[in-house]
């Protein structure tokens, strides 16, 4: 939930009423927000208020005070007027490869105070962090209209093609190329807050810019505005532009910006539209055809039909349509009862969070009062239960602990070196999920195997008494790349066992493998054990459910298996490492994991003084069978 900080006295002045801290806390709770903290800053009492992430309209003093006043029926929801467009912005096709969309608006005759101007800037910051996804989807630019000559052009150019003075440049400084500006922001500690935004376009061959008719650079989105059109408290006419990679979100952001601050215009709640032309055409969600020009912002209400029966069923209330309509009006909607079964609701442009009639039912619940809704037993009972995979994992943990192994829990991230080079494995880049911006070399990738974590634990405890050896195990997930998955990656549940002691202890890990398979009702293959077939027949005679057979195949033998199991032949001592293969009831053979005594070089790399053996198995497929 975003947290906004508002001066208490400014908020109460905007609402026209004062509250005690307890009273305001109760009001926030009733409205569905939370007074998180009260702090003193420079002699002012500041309220830190948590608001829902989708309520973009209450991220500033203006929106919150208006929403609360309408909620308390102190005033009615505003009606916004849109003036015809007299200004235009032309978009060139060169922007298609970087940020193809721009929407604009004008606020005329604005009367800012230092407090309202700061709120204007703060709202942009909140929107950038929230719906704009740190400017990757939408970037907001605001300019002093009196400094511009229209029509404005939005184009993409080479990084060294233009020069301009950015917003923070000294008054008498020389213009810089676009690349010089971004290089400064990437290296100057004083501009560190802009560093992450430079990554959005830095590697692109063309960078987006807005220029007025005279060629003056207004802004370099999504990074910085130009000094030429810099705003101040004395600015009277404001030009707002939102460049974006998502047209829908750009329209939402523009609507929020102008509906929050149109109250300060010479004609309150009046916005001047701007015509945006796309010679190349853009696809829109509203039309199946390409759009070659649009006038923004629309500022129109959206019509929804709320079935009265749906409100009754969801809330467990029996309210008449007039009462439901009155409650919706408290949430800034305009409602009209069409019949005893339906209510026509006009949703204002700043309420972008309303996407479906069920959102209107939520507004009815808020306006009615959550604490006033009677408690009822649900009409159906659908208890949850533990996933089969988690249940099986917990049972395995208990059995391995009973067998004398100590459970550990290691980090889900590791370095590439520990996952590959330290295990004498090749890293071809097709297995591990890499972090885009790792903070340390220790956490570069999501672990593709549990073995590095077990070895690191042994490394940290190599001074422990080794008379009986250390027996460790872990049952956790690894993360692997998978082009067939929706997210291009998948989790895999594995069990790993490691022994370190005076002897290599391979028989300890081998015995653990046999015990795990026994618990899963998987029998040894006849080629692995002469008694395997006889044991399977014995169990069949007892009507036991068999889950197939398993075999240990030595590395180096001919096998159709993939050998993609967190280790490689070079990881193990020659002749003491192999694959664990499982043939299921349908006759399909799959690779489960590896078993073996680690190669002395692997042991030495980790600074260990005793031999080490380990076992790692993938157990996802056994969950439903178990």
Image (tube, rainbow, N blue to C red):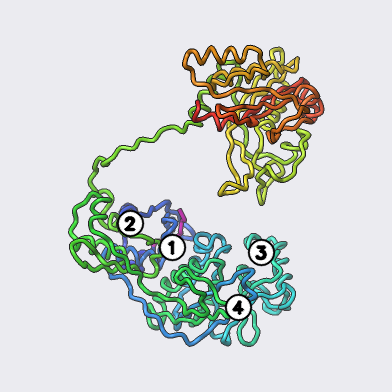
Left or right of residue 314: residue 581: right
What is the x, y in percent for residue 506?
71, 18
> Residue at image x 64%, y 44%?
481
> Residue at image x 62%, y 45%?
482
**Other-residue count near label 1 (Cα within 10 Å), few / some / many at <14 / 14–19 / ≥20:** many
Stretch of the chain drawn in magenta: 1-8
What is the x, y in percent for residue 137?
55, 64
Task: Residue under label 3, please give it.
Answer: 198
Task: Residue under label 4, please give it.
Answer: 154
Q: Gap between marks 2 and 4, in whole Å?
A: 39 Å
Q: Gap between marks 3 and 4, in whole Å?
A: 19 Å
**Other-residue count near label 4 (Cα within 10 Å), few / some / many at <14 / 14–19 / ≥20:** many
Q: Gap between marks 3 and 1, in whole Å?
A: 25 Å
2 or 4: mark nearer the eye: 2
The answer to whether residue 181 is magenta is no
Circles 1, 2 touching at the beta carbon (< 8 Å):
no
**Other-residue count near label 3 (Cα within 10 Å), few / some / many at <14 / 14–19 / ≥20:** some
Using the image, tell me which numbered label, if any, was put on residue 358. 2
Query: What is the magenta segment's predominant secondary structure?
Result: strand
Sequence order check, earlier mark of 1 and 2? 1
Q: Nearer the viewer, residue 173 or 339?
A: 339
3 or 4: mark nearer the eye: 4
Q: Quadrant of residue 403?
A: top right
Using the image, tell me which numbered label, if any, was put on residue 318. none
Sequence order check, earlier mark of 3 and 4? 4
Q: Secondary structure at mark 2?
A: helix
Q: Quadrant of residue 383?
A: top left
What is the x, y in percent for residue 460?
70, 28
Q: Secondary structure at mark 3?
A: helix
Task: Residue under label 1, please give it.
Answer: 56
Sequence order check, earlier mark of 3 and 1? 1
């Amino acid at each position: 939930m975003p947290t906004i900080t508002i001066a208490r006295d400014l908020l109460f002045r905007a609402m026209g009423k004062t509250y005690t801290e307890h009273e305001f806390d109760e009001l926030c709770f009733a409205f569905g927000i939370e007074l998180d903290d009260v702090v003193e800053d420079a002699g002012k009492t500041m309220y830190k208020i948590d608001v829902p992430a989708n309520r973009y309209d209450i991220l500033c003093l203006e929106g919150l005070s208006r929403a609360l006043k309408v909620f308390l029926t102190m005033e009615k929801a505003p009606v916004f007027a849109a003036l015809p467009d007299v200004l235009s912005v032309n978009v060139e096709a060169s922007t298609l490869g970087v940020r193809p969309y721009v929407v604009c608006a004008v606020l005329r005759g604005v009367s800012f105070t230092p407090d309202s101007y700061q709120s204007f800037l703060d709202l942009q910051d909140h929107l950038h962090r929230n719906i704009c996804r740190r400017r990757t989807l939408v970037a907001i630019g605001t300019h002093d209209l009196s400094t511009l000559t229209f029509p404005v052009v939005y184009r993409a150019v080479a990084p060294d093609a233009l020069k301009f003075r950015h917003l923070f440049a000294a008054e008498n400084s020389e213009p810089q190329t676009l690349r010089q500006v971004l290089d400064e922001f990437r290296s100057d500690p004083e501009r560190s807050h802009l560093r992450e935004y430079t990554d959005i376009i830095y590697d692109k061959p063309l960078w987006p810019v807005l220029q007025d008719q005279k060629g003056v650079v207004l802004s370099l989105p999504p990074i910085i505005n130009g000094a030429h059109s810099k705003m101040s408290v004395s600015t009277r006419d404001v030009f707002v532009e939102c460049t974006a990679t998502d047209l829908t979100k750009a329209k939402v952001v523009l609507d929020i910006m102008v509906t929050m601050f149109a109250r300060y215009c010479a004609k309150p709640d009046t916005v001047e539209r701007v015509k945006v032309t796309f010679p190349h055409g853009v696809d829109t969600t509203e039309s199946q055809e390409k759009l070659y020009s649009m006038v923004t912002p629309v500022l129109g209400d959206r019509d929804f039909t709320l079935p009265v029966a749906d409100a009754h069923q969801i809330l467990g209330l029996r309210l008449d349509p007039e009462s439901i309509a009155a409650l919706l009006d408290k949430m800034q909607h305009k409602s009209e009862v069409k019949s005893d079964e339906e209510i026509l609701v006009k949703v204002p442009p700043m309420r972008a969070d309303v996407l479906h009639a069920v959102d209107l039912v939520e507004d009815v619940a808020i306006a009615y009062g959550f604490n006033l809704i009677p408690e009822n037993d649900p009409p159906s009972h659908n208890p949850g239960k533990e996933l089969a995979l988690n249940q099986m994992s917990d049972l395995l943990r208990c059995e391995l602990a009973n067998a004398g192994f100590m459970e550990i829990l290691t980090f889900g991230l590791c370095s590439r070196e520990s996952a590959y080079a330290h295990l004498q494995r090749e890293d071809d880049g097709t297995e591990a999920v890499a972090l885009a911006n790792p903070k340390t070399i220790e956490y570069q990738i999501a672990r593709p195997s549990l073995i590095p974590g077990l070895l690191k634990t042994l490394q940290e405890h190599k001074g422990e008494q080794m008379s009986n050896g250390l027996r460790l195990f872990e049952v956790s997930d690894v993360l692997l790349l998978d082009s067939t998955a929706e997210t291009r990656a998948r989790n895999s549940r594995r069990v790993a066992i490691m022994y370190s002691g005076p002897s290599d202890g391979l028989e300890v890990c081998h015995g653990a493998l046999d015990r795990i398979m026994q618990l899963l009702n998987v029998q040894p293959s006849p080629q692995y054990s002469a008694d395997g077939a006889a044991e399977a027949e014995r169990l069949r005679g007892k009507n036991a459910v068999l889950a197939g057979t398993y075999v240990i195949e030595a590395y180096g033998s001919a096998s159709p298996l993939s050998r993609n199991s967190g280790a490689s032949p070079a990881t193990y001592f020659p002749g003491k490492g192999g694959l664990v293969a499982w043939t299921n009831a349908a006759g399909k053979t799959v690779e489960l994991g590896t078993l073996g005594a680690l190669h002395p070089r692997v042991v030495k790399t980790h600074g260990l003084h005793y031999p080490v053996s380990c076992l790692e198995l993938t157990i996802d497929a056994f969950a439903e069978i178990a």
